[in-house]
Image: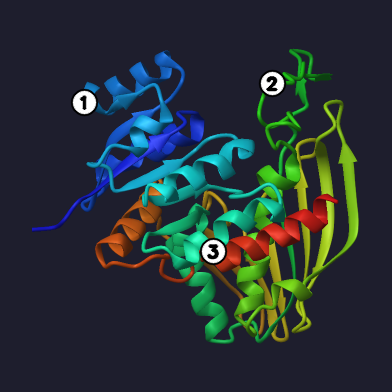
Amino acid sequence: MTQIINWGIIGLGNVALEFAKAFKDSNNSKLIGISSKNQDKIQIFKEKFNINKDYCFNKYEDLLNCEDIDIIYIALPNSMHKEWIKKSIERKKNVLIEKPAFMSLAETESIKKKVLNGNFFFSESFIYRYTPQIFQVLELLKNNIIGEPISMLSNYGTNLLTKKNIFGFSKKKKININNRLHSKKLGGGAILDLGCYPVSLSILIASTISKIDYDKIKVLDKIKELGSTEVDINSHAKLEFENGFTSEVNASFSKEIGKETVIRGTDGIMRIMNPWQVEPSTIILEGKINKKIEVECVNNIFLYEINTISKNILEGKTKPDFPGPSIEETIGGTKVLEKWLN
């Protein structure tokens, strides 16, 4: 009989909603607990996902204290991550933290040692790391289909600041300063919300060449355009790794730069049309081999992450199987994001 890992969610926003939908197709995981300070959200989740009222909590601490829950998915605004990671691991709870795990390197100091020395699971939630598409990318690189990776261009951005009226003319949207994306206090901005993805993928691809020394990653050619709420809305940087690999990363709230990543190798090019949500799940090879690859994926890719992490916990592991991000990589990625931000 398959063992089941019981999950709880802190913070019931849009990402948590999509995450929760995936449990219906899992054979080793169950969502049994939720916590929010918003009673309406609790009621919506309770009814939609058939959550027992005894596992619906207004206080986050009550969810952490629930012995029936094996792992906590923290889906709170960035500014609240450090506090609730710390409180979760103090209660020896397994933790999946929504990306980016931390807003600064300083936030990692009190947590790193506890995670490394603790007998519990911890990881940052980058769902693309668990999809069949990323496994296909890594297999193609392993087989030297484009040769050794030399450089990369990775984009993630869309225009959140304007909309078109009925006549087709662009009009500025009214910005809600309390929205987490636009609030400096809550850790908003394009770099933290979207730029963490290209940074994460850059680190992954660079690691296929040689082991990464995170302290030696250079962040060059930085561009950071600030919006009306003082968070970055359009940002660029060039990452230079010790092994010679370089990656240009772009994140935007103000421009339709898309989601494509292009990896250039010594023998060709690999285009990943959408690494992040895998819609479409298409890889295009150009050069020595010219080929279009469509990778079959489930509709809700959170399922891959949930199943893998539950399997890892059942196996007694404290970090996800590769290419899931380890605590060392999360801290390394935080160093890069901090250099880009400052």
CA separation in Å, label 1 and label 2: 32 Å
- The foreground one among 298 and 43 is 43
Q: Is residue 226 left or right of residue 179?
A: right
Contact between labelled residues 1 and 3, with CB atoms less than 8 Å apart: no
60 relative to 276, above or below: above
Where is residue 334 shown, x and y percent of the image?
Answer: 68, 57
What is the spatial separation of the Cα atoms under label 2 and label 3, in whole angstroms? 33 Å
143 lies above or below 22: below
Mark 1 and mark 2 lie on one chain; the one further toward the N terminus is 1
Asked which secondary structure carries label 2, the reply is loop
Q: Visible in this render: residue 217?
A: yes
Q: Report x, y in % for residue 292.
A: 55, 67
- Give the residue drawn at x 49%, y 60%: 114
Quadrant of the image occupied by residue 78? top right
Q: How many marks?
A: 3
Foreground pick, 97 / 120 = 120
For the N terminus, the image quarter is: bottom left
Q: Residue at x 79, y 14 (%)?
A: 167
For disc 3, the marked residue is 113
Amino acid residing under circle 2: Asn
- Residue tagged 2: 178
Camera-nearest residue between 266 and 286: 266
Amino acid type indicated by mark 3: Lys
Measure the C-alpha gap from mark 3 to mark 1.
36 Å
Asked where in the image residue 186 lies, by quadrant, the reply is top right
Per the rendering, the mark at residue 52 is 1
Mark 2 packing: few (<14 Cα in 10 Å), some, or many (20+)?
A: few
Question: Whole-percent x and y of residue 231?
Answer: 81, 35
Tell me the element at label 1.
loop
